[in-house]
Image: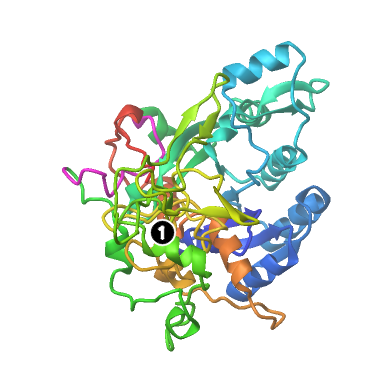
Amino acid sequence: MNAISLFACGGIGDLGLQHAGFEVLVANELLEERAEVFKFNYPSTQMIVGDIADKQQEIIAKTRKLLAGQALDLVFATPPCQGMSKNGRGKLLNAIRKGDKAEIDTRNLLIIPTIAIFLATGAHTLVLENVSEMENTYIPNPSKNGEMIGIIDFIKQSLGAEFSSSIRVVEFADYGVPQCRQRLISIFTKHEKLKKHLQLFGSLFPMPTHSKTGQELPRWQTVRDAIAHLPSLDARQPATAKHTTIQYHSVPLLDEAKYLWVANTPPEKSAFDNQCINPSCLFDKNLTHGASKDKNGINRFNTETPLYCIKCNHLLPRPWVKEGDNYRIMKGYTSAYKRMGWDNPCSTLTRNLSYACSDNKVHPEQNRVLSLYEAMILHTITHYAFHWQRTDGKKVSDKLIRELIGESIPPAGLEKIFSHLALLSKGIPQSPKQPSFGQQELCFA
C-alpha cells in the first residue's frame, strides 16, 4: 500500500507506518537536520525539505509522478502542536463571540495545506496525530471570510459528506508501549470497506492489547519490564555516568546540589518532599510540596513549602536557589525532580527528558535521569532497525535525539493502528468488539 508522510520529523512515527505494510513514497519536513536523519533511514522515500505551505505543489507533483497511475492509499500527518489551545471549547467560543480572542498561531494554519495535499493526491484515508487540545483549537475559515471554525470541523467541511471519521484520544500504553502517552488520533476515510466497518462497529481503532488493571488483558508494560535489566549508572562522576559498550547508555552529570536532592529522594517521590538529613534530627514531618488552583482556576504550586527543617532549622535537600548567602525554595511542581515508578509505564517522554527537573524523569532508584538508550526502549524505537545517522555524515547530537523522541509517537503503537486499517481496507475481518470511551483508562503517571 502507498502512503505519504507530512511533518515527518526524523521518521520515528513512520517506522509504524512502514512496518504495517505501507511504502512511504514522499515525505515532507521543515527542518534540514531532522530530514537528514529521515533520509538515512528511508533512502527510497523522496524527502522534500521546507515549509509545507511553500512546498505544497511540489509534494503533490512528486507524489503523482511516483504513483505513475497507481492509487495513493493513505496520508499520515502530524502538524505541530505548540499552537494548540489548552482552554476549553466553551471558554473559547465565549471569547470568540465577545470578540476577545487570542492572536492566531500561524502553526495552526498548517492544517490548510495539509488538507489541500490530501485531496489533491486522491488518497482514500487521512490519519492525523496531535495533542488532545486540537479538538478545542479554532482557525479562521478561508472559505467564509475568516469566520472562526474548529480545526476538526474545518477538516470535515473541507472533505465533505463522502468522508467518514473515527476520532479518539488514544492512550498508547493500551497498545503495549511502556509509556503513558495520550494523543488525539483522527482518521478520515472514503474507503468503502473502512466506512462499512465504522458504520457497523463505531470505530476504526484496533482493540487495546493491554490494560491498567491487567484483569481482562495483559497489564500495561512497565518501566521495570523495559529497562530494569540495564547496567546501573550514577551521575556523580564521569566514570560512572557512561557505560563503556552500550551506545547512548550514558547520562549527564548532576552538580553537587542536584545530586544531593536526587540522592535523598525516595521511590516515586519528588525532591521537593525530601525530609531532614541532619543526623541529630532526621525529622520527617516537614510539610510536603503541592499545588492548588487559584481563583481563576489556574494550577499554582505552593509557595509555602519549607526549605528549612521546622524542628532543627537545617537546610533540607530540596530544590533551592541560592541568592547571595541565602536560599529560597525553587519554583516548581510536584512532578519536578521526581522519581519514576518501576511498576507503571513511564510518563510522556518530552524533549527535556534528560533534565532532572523535567516531569517524572529521575530514575526509579539510581541517582540520575534516563539515559538516551533507555528512552529509546521506552519509546519502542529499539523494536526496529533505526539508525541515528544523517546522510550528510554529520553527527546526530544528543539534543536532536531528544527532540526527535519528544516530538514523535511510539512507533509500536502506531504500527497497531496502521496494521488494523490496512487489514480492514483489504477486507480481512478484525475484532468488532470495542470498549466504550468511558471504559478506556488514560494514565497520568
Q: Can you give x and y, in whole percent of width and height, for residue 305 in the image? A: 46, 40
Identify which residue is drawn at 31% across, 55% down: 341
- Left/right placement of residue 68 relative to residue 442 reads right
Q: Can you give x and y, in whole percent of width and height, for residue 154 in the image? A: 67, 28
> Magenta segment, principal secondary structure?
loop
Residue on which disc 1 sits = 412
**Residue 213 painted magenta:** yes
Identify which residue is drawn at 52% across, 72% down: 252
In-front residue for pair 262/51: 262
Q: Total number of numbered labels?
A: 1
In-front residue for pair 381/282: 282
The furthest residue to the bottom: 244
Amino acid under disc 1: Ala
Res 20 visible = no
The furthest residue to the left: 215
Q: What stretch is highlighted in magenta?
A: 201-215
Res 111 visible = yes
